[in-house]
Amino acid sequence: MKRRDFLLGTAATAGVMGAASWGAARSTEQQLTIQTARFAFREKPTDGLVSLSPDAPPPVIYGTQGNPMRLRVANGTEDYTAMHWHGLRIANAMDGVPYLTQMPIAGGESFEYEFTPPDAGTYWYHPHCMTMAQMAHGLTGVMVIREAEDPGFDGDQVINLRDFRLDGNGAFLSYYSARGAARGGTHGNVLTANWLRAPVYDHPAGGLVRLRIVNTDTTRIYKLHLSTAQARIIAWDGHPVEIDVPLPSATEPLLVGPGQRVDFALRMPASEGQTADLLAELPGQPTRTMAKLRSVGTNLARNMAELKPLPANPISRPDPTNAEVLDFVFGWTPEGGPPNDGYCGSLGYSFWSINRTPWAGDAAKGTGPLATLERGKSYVLRLRNESPNLHPIHLHGLAFIPIRSNLRTLPPLVTDTMLLLKDEVAEIALVADNPGDWAFHCHVIEHQKTGLAGYIRVT
Ligand code: C2O
Ligand code: CU
Ligand code: CU
């Protein structure tokens, strides 16, 4: 398998968490108030951001596998909202999809999300109502679900990658365009990690650090690699990687689409002050440093070989030989009125479709599921990309395993988001083990909001 053939999704988190804090938080209760915020990405502050505090990015939310979480989301804005927990396999009623699993949360109202994460790993959260507007203005945060047992790292670093579209005065430029929505999406011009430009985080020299990278951008497919070879990919889209995956490089970077996450284990350089860097390749530009990890203190002299594999999450393994095959075609729409998204914000066009039908809208009455799956059965979903653009296709509530593609060898990883390449036909397999109506859409939000969405029912 060539490295460039290996496409993963990423999601990372921000913040430093020492191994010492393991086990501190058991059941989690937290109040999250969506509000407008102000923050200086460059010299001049940017107003009109949406976050969970007045002057900072949405925080990393920590939970522990198998322990209940209660997150009370209050809407302190004038727009409607609903919060989704990307990648968590929880009860449908807690999934945060407006009109499908709950009604939108009005300004001044709140909604209590209660769930017990079945899986450990790197996940994230974002609104699913006013999705484009609120995400583009900042409301995307990382969730870290800790393993029940401390896996023994000397440091834990979350990196939330996201772009903003700002003018020279720090003011927001329009966050979508009809031209972008009909093509690859509208890209931001200020690239950040944890809302910072090339932040530096300190970790113990010679220590083993878990680097959790999350792409929460609305558009950009990040092409990533590290400056160090003392590293290994240990998880992909939340779930532990059980096979040896080649390390990405400048010439063969890792593609991480919106919604995807990659966890690296890396060994910090031995001498104080040296760094291990997260690097991005951007079209027509020199390699960009997204974040740096800097060694501090005396050399812990840890060895990559000391790493124990992460315990597998309790995913039902599909039996593809015994599975019904369901076809999904992603492409442009033959015709398109604007979707009816009710209180959840429409971009005003339909450009995209699944199975040649654009999503009628979040609030459109009588919109049936794209497919109905029987609980407990294995299925193969055959995903065909009929467009020249890449689409990170995301399914809520269920984990799946890519099994085959017409273009590349797909490593058998457990995931919730599949980055479909141009002209790709990929098959993914799953067990329909979580009942409910599960949103199924492209995570380039301009595509999602202009037709490339639907849902799958598990009965
Ligand atoms: Cu991360 Cu339906 O979304
Ligand atoms: Cu999701
Ligand atoms: Cu798309």
Image (cartoon, rainbow, N blue to C red):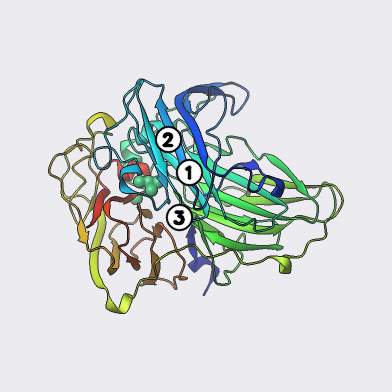
Res 305 quadrant in image: bottom right
Q: How many marks?
A: 3
- Badge 1 crowding class, 10 Å Cα cut-off, few under 14, some 14 to 19, many 20 or more, is many
| Image position, residue 341 (x, y; %) | 23, 35
User: Where, quadrant-wise, is the C terminus in this rendering?
Assistant: bottom left
- Badge 2 crowding class, 10 Å Cα cut-off, few under 14, some 14 to 19, many 20 or more, is many
- Seen from the viewer's position, the closer of residues 257 and 61 is 61
Instruction: Mark 2 and mark 1 in contact? Answer it, CB < 8 Å.
Output: yes
- Seen from the viewer's position, the closer of residues 295 and 151 is 151
Res 110 quadrant in image: top left
- Relative to 32, does residue 398 appear above or below in the rendering? below
| Kind of residue indicated by mark 3 | Pro
| Image position, residue 426 (x, y; %) | 34, 67
| Kind of residue indicated by mark 2 | Met
Disc 2 to disc 1, how far (Cα)?
Answer: 9 Å
Disc 3 to disc 2, how far (Cα)?
Answer: 26 Å
| Kind of residue indicated by mark 1 | Thr
- Badge 3 crowding class, 10 Å Cα cut-off, few under 14, some 14 to 19, many 20 or more, is some
Residue 18 is left or right of residue 328, and the answer is right
Residue at the spot 59% in from the left edge and 45% down from the top edge: 159
Q: Is mark 3 on a helix, strand or loop?
A: loop
- Relative to 393, does residue 30 appear above or below in the rendering? above
Instruction: Name the residue carrying label 3.
Output: 118
Residue at the spot 38% in from the left edge and 50% down from the top edge: 90
Residue farthest along the right direction in this orientation: 298
Q: Is label 1's Cβ within 8 Å of ligand 1? A: no
Instruction: Name the residue carrying label 1.
Output: 216
Foreground disc of the pair 1, 3: 3
Instruction: Name the residue carrying label 2.
Output: 135
